[in-house]
Image (cartoon, rainbow, N blue to C red):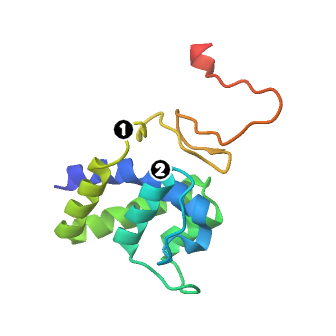
Amino acid sequence: MSGDVVQVVAEITPYITAAAGAYGVAVLARTQEEAATATVALGRRLAQRIFGTRADGEELPEALADVVEDPDDPDNTAALRKAVRKALLADGELAADVRELLARAPAAVRTGDRSQTVVNSVIVGDAIQIGSIGGDAHIGSPDRA
């Protein structure tokens, strides 16, 4: 069970991080604002299922608040993974619900090693979603030059 949870945590953390970056402190708010991408929408649903919803002004759990403050900090992401893992290991029903949400993830969204999610021009994987680019742009990978 523990190994399975670790895999699920690795798969869902990029979604929650993307949602935290997009929504900031409103990531757990009850309101249903339109999400920027399918990744962000799924991340928000996952975060709300794991951490619960919050009213405006309510504090976020520390691990999630730290990701909101600095989503690029790997220590914050690691703390978020640990908090999610603890929650899933403590509640089998929650873990099953999260697996179900993850199974309904859009096929075009990849998570895991070398996967990327771009939110507000932040890259965290190997797939890139861009709302718009002004001027010249070159997107490539040094290992695929």
Quarter where residue 142 is shown: top right
Q: Residue 117 carries which label?
A: none
Q: Mark 2 points at which residue?
A: 39
Question: Looking at the picture, does residue 4 appear above or below residue 112?
Answer: below
Give how far across and how far down residue 128 sits, in percent: 57, 35
Give how far across and how far down residue 13 sits, in percent: 43, 54
Q: What element carries label 2?
A: helix
- Number of on-image labels: 2
Front in this rendered view, residue 64 or 24: 24
Name the residue: 24% across, 68% down: 94
Q: Quadrant of the C terminus?
A: top right
Q: Name the residue under label 1.
A: 107
Name the residue: 50% across, 77% down: 29
Front in this rendered view, residue 60 or 19: 19
Give how far across and how far down residue 12 sits, in percent: 38, 53
Q: What element carries label 1?
A: loop
Quarter where residue 58 is shown: bottom right
Question: Looking at the picture, does residue 80 appear above or below residue 122?
Answer: below
* Three-letter code, disc 2: Thr
Front in this rendered view, residue 47 or 33: 33
Name the residue: 54% across, 83% down: 59
* Three-letter code, disc 1: Ala
Q: In this view, does 6 lie to the left or right of 28?
A: left
Front in this rendered view, residue 135 or 142: 135
| Residue at the farthest top position | 145
Ranked by sequence position, the earlier of labels 1 and 2 is 2
Quarter where residue 2 is shown: bottom left
Q: Quadrant of the N terminus?
A: bottom left
Do the CB atoms of the residues marked 1 and 2 lie less than 8 Å apart? no
Is the residue marked by circle 1 packed among few (<14), some (14-19), or many (20+) residues within 10 Å? few
